[in-house]
Image (spheres, helix red, strand yellow):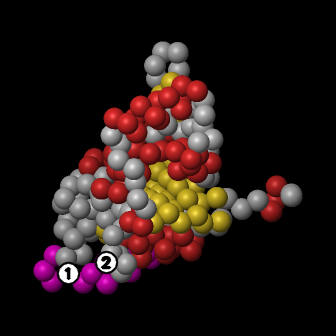
Amino acid sequence: MSCYNHKKTILHIDSCVRRDSRTERLAQALLKELDGEVIQLRLEDMAFEPSDEAFLNKRDQLIEAGAFDHEMFDLARQFAEAEVIVISAPYWDLSFPASLKQYVEKICVNGVTFEYTPEGIPQGLCKAQRLYYVMTAGGDYAPEEYGYGYIQALARGYFGITDFRLIKATGLDIIGADAEKILQDCIEHEILERDV
C-alpha cells in the first residue's frame, strides 16, 4: 500500500453518559473535520474489571514476563497505536465521568504506553502527537486542572503526546443562557474556523 493512501487512525474515547450528550455533539462535529479512520470507544457500554489487588498482581506478572499481547493490554495497545486521540468528557463535579478514570487505569501500562528511563523518568511510547479534549459544562466554573489539565499532564508526562487542543462550551445551564447558541458558536469558532 502506498504511504500516500494512509489514513490516520483516530481513537475517539467517548465518556459521555447521555445519548443526547452535548459534549458528544461537539465531538462529532470535530470528528467530521478530521481526516482519518475513526475507532469509537463508548466507555459507558464497557465493563471495566476492578483495579483491585488481584488485578494489579496479575498485571504486574504479565508486565514482568513481557506478555504485552495479553488481552488485559488490548486497550493500552490500541491507545498507543492511535495517531490522533479525541476524548469527549462532560465536566461533572470538578472532574469527568468515572468511566474515563477507569479507562485511564487500564491504559497506563509500563512497556506499552510508556516506559521508565534508567533514571526513573517516564518516557512516552504512544504514536499520537495530538490529543483533542472536548468538554461542556452547565456552569462557567470549570477549572481546567481537574479535567482537561489532568489528562494533559498525564499525556505529556507519561504518553509522550505533545500537542493538545481544548474544545469547550460552558455556561450551558445558566438561567437565561441560550445553550444552542453557545454550542453553535463553539462549533463555528473552535472547530470550523480553526486548523484542527
Q: CA distance from mark 1 to mark 2?
A: 8 Å
> Residue pushed farthest right?
1
* Nearer to the camera, 3 or 54: 54
Magenta stretch containing residue 183, yes or no? yes
**Does the image show residue 97?**
yes
Residue ID at (58%, 27%): 65
In the depicted structure, whether residue 20 falls above or below residue 111 = below
Tell me where the magenta segment starts and ends, as one range. Answer: 174-190
Q: Which residue is mark 2?
A: 182
Residue ID at (16%, 76%): 174
* Residue 176 position within the rendered picture, expressed as x and y whole percent measured from the top left: 15, 83
- For badge 1, the amino acid type reads Ala
* Nearer to the camera, 111 or 196: 111
Q: Quadrant of the C terminus?
A: bottom right
* Residue 125 position within the rendered picture, expressed as x and y whole percent measured from the top left: 58, 36
Q: Are marks 1 and 2 in contact (CB under 8 Å)?
A: yes
In the depicted structure, whether residue 105 falls above or below residue 122 = below
Residue ID at (46%, 34%): 58
Q: Residue 16 sits in which quadrant?
A: bottom left
Side of 4 where 134 appears, left or right: left
Residue ID at (86%, 57%): 2
* Nearer to the camera, 138 or 196: 138
Which is nearer the N-term, disc 1 or disc 2?
1
Of helix, strand and loop, which one carries label 1? loop
Mark 1 burial class by Cα count in 10 Å: few <14, some 14-19, many 20+ = few
* Residue 22 position within the rendered picture, expressed as x and y whole percent measured from the top left: 35, 76
- For badge 2, the amino acid type reads Ile
Q: Which residue is mark 1?
A: 177
